[in-house]
Amino acid sequence: MNTVVGLVGIVQMLLTIAIWALVIQAVLSWLIAFNVINTYNDFVRTVVVTLDRLTEPLLRPIRRFVPPMGGVDLSSLVLILILIGLRDYLIPGVVTDLLL
């Protein structure tokens, strides 16, 4: 029983990290689009490339179903909502069903 609760905690933490990575990537993309930060800086480029490599495999399937609307990519928002739903509602519900 404690093992299941520990695994659920780890999965929830990983989902939270994924949500924050998506939020940071979205903010960075806006800052780059409005020329607030410069991608010629090695640190900025490293962060952007790393976040892109981490999030792109998760966003690619969603982009097939959610087209860009007026130049705005809503796939990050859709994925964040899905991950929040998993973290806050689905996983705790499944665990309580298993433990009862």
Image (spheres, rainbow, N blue to C red):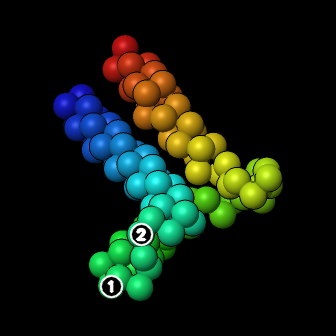
Q: Residue tagged by mark 2?
A: 37
Residue 48 sits above or below residue 69 on the image: below
In this picture, residue 69 sits left or right of residue 86? right
Locate residue 46, reporting x and y percent: 36, 79
Which one is nearer the viewer's eye here, 5 or 72?
A: 72
Residue in the picture at 48% in, 25% down: 89
Residue in the picture at 57% in, 39% down: 82
On the image, which quarter does residue 11 sit in? top left
On residue 42, the disc is 1
Please, what secondary structure does the residue beneath circle 1 have? helix
Locate residue 93, reporting x and y percent: 45, 22
Amino acid of disc 1: Asp
Q: Image quadrant for the C terminus?
A: top left
In this picture, residue 4 sits left or right of residue 61? left
On residue 9, the disc is none
Q: Earlier in the sequence, mark 1 or mark 2?
A: 2
Work out whether residue 94 can be spotted: no
Work out whether residue 4 can be spotted: yes
Residue 78 sits above or below residue 44 on the image: above
Please, what secondary structure does the residue beneath circle 2 have? loop
Which one is nearer the viewer's eye here, 36 or 51?
A: 36
Amino acid of disc 2: Ile
Q: How many marks?
A: 2
On the image, which quarter does residue 40 sit in? bottom left
Q: Image quadrant for the N terminus?
A: top left
Label 1 Cα neighbours within 10 Å, binned few <14 / some 14-19 / many ≥20 = few
Locate residue 13, reporting x and y percent: 30, 43
Label 2 Cα neighbours within 10 Å, binned few <14 / some 14-19 / many ≥20 = some
Residue found farthest to the left: 2
Residue in the picture at 55% in, 63% down: 34
**Circle 1 or circle 2, nearest the eye:** 2
Locate residue 41, reporting x and y percent: 35, 82
